[in-house]
Amino acid sequence: MIALGTWLLAIGLCDLLRATRDTITTRHRLLLVALGLCLLLFAGTWLGLPVRGWTTVGVTWVVGLVGWLVCSSAALDAGSGQHARWRAAAFAALLGPGLLLALLGDAVSLTPGLPGLVDDSLLGRLGAETGLVLAGAVLFQISTANIAVRLLLDAVGVPAVTNEKKLKGGRVLGPMERLFIVGLGLAGSLGAAAVVVAAKALLRYPELQRT
C-alpha cells in the first residue's frame, strides 16, 4: 500500500493548490504537473525504488498523476469542449492506476526510512509506511475528493447553482465529513461511520426529491 499512499500524497498536494478554483490556466496546469513529477521522483528515490519498480510503479505513478491533473482540470474548464470525455478520462486516470498500484505495491520492495529525530514522535511510532499511507488518504479527502465530487455532480447533470462555486462552506464541510468518516473507520467504528452516512443521506433526501 505504500506505493498507493505515495501516489495519493503527490496528487493530494497538487490538488490542494487548486482546490478553491475549478478553472486554471494552462501555465498553472503545467506547473502542477511539474510539481507532481518532482514529488514522485523524490519519493521514489527516498523509498529506494529499484529499476524494476521504476518501470512498473514509477510509470503508473506518472501516467495516473498527469492524466488526473490534466483531464480533471480540462473537464472543469468551461472554455474546453468535450467535457464528458475529459471527465471519463479523469476518472479512468484516478481509478485505474489506483487499483493497479494497490496490486503492484506489494510486488516491489520499498524500504522507507525516517531520521532518528522523529523516533519519539507520532510519526516515529506509526512508522514511515503507515504515516505515508495515512497522509495520502487525508490529503485525498481534503483536496482531491472535492474535485472528484464536482466532476461526478457534473456527470449526473447537477450543475453548480448560482454562486455555489464562490461559497467556501461546502468545500470545507465536505472534507471535514469525509475525514470524520475515515477516522471512524480507522478506529474500527464502522457502525458509527454507517450511521453518519445514513444521517447525511436523510438530511439530503428533500433535496434529492426536488432534483
Image (cartoon, helix red, strand yellow):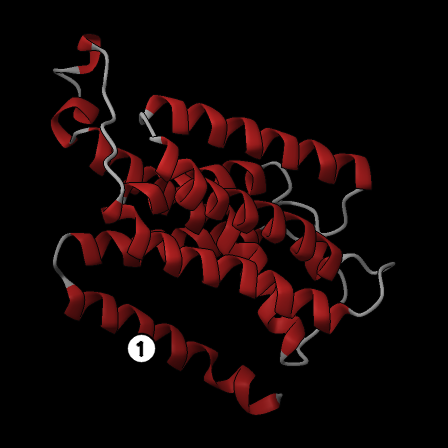
Which residue corresponds to mark 1?
A: 198
Residue at position x 61%, y 46% in the image: 66
As shown in the figure, which amino acid type bears the numbered disc 1?
Answer: Ala
Say what secondary structure mark 1 lies in.
Answer: helix
Residue at position x 36%, y 38% in the image: 52
In this view of the protein, which residue sits in the foreground, 5 or 123?
Answer: 5
Residue 2 found in image quarter: top left
Indicate the position of residue 26 as horizontal and vertical percent values. 81, 41
Q: Residues within 10 Å of mark 1 (few under 14, many from 20)?
A: few
Residue at position x 14%, y 61% in the image: 189
Which quarter of the rendering shows the C terminus?
bottom right
Residue at position x 80%, y 35% in the image: 27
134 sits to left or right of 208: left
Residue 97 found in image quarter: bottom left
In this view of the protein, which residue sits in the foreground, 177 or 146?
Answer: 146
In this view of the protein, which residue sits in the foreground, 28 or 143?
Answer: 28
Indicate the position of residue 15 as horizontal and vertical percent values. 57, 43
Indicate the position of residue 34 as horizontal and vertical percent values. 64, 31
Q: Is residue 210 above or below residue 170?
A: below
Q: Is residue 43 above or below residue 118?
A: below
